[in-house]
Image: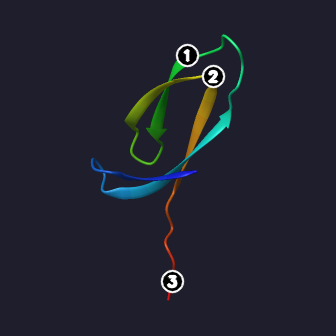
Amino acid sequence: MEQYNNPECKKEFYVSSIGGGVPGGKELEPVIFSYCGTTVRIEMTSATFTTRKFEGFNK
């Protein structure tokens, strides 16, 4: 799981990779931040990506 800051909508979020490791199955897969619909990167992989909002910690 990786943490990102989306400069377009000023929100932090996490990216998780699901699957992968399929021989010969690599495609260009976008990482799309679902809360504002922006693509933050495109990666050649056989996995897919999910995103979720960074909720932070309450004190």
Q: Are marks 1 and 2 in contact (CB under 8 Å)?
A: yes
Q: Which residue is mark 1?
A: 27
Tell me residue 48's x, y (percent).
61, 31
Horizontal side of residue 36 vs 22, given as left or right: left
Of 10 and 14, which appears nearest the observer?
A: 14
**What's the amino acid at mark 3?**
Asn
Horizontal side of residue 15 vs 6, given as left or right: right
**What's the amino acid at mark 2?**
Ser
Q: Which residue is mark 2?
A: 46
Pick whichever of labels 3 and 1 is earlier in the sequence: 1
Pick whichever of labels 1 and 2 is earlier in the sequence: 1
Tell me residue 2's x, y (percent).
51, 51
Mark 3 and mark 2: Cα distance apart in space: 37 Å
Above or below, comparing residue 24 to residue 48 in the picture: above
Mark 3 and mark 1: Cα distance apart in space: 39 Å
Pick whichever of labels 3 and 2 is earlier in the sequence: 2
The residue shown at (27%, 47%) is 8
Above or below, comparing residue 43 to residue 59 in the picture: above
Q: How dense is the environment of label 2, judged by Cα within 10 Å: few (below 14), some, or many (20 and up)?
A: some
Q: Residue furthest left?
A: 8
Name the element at disc 1. Answer: strand
Q: Which residue is mark 3?
A: 58
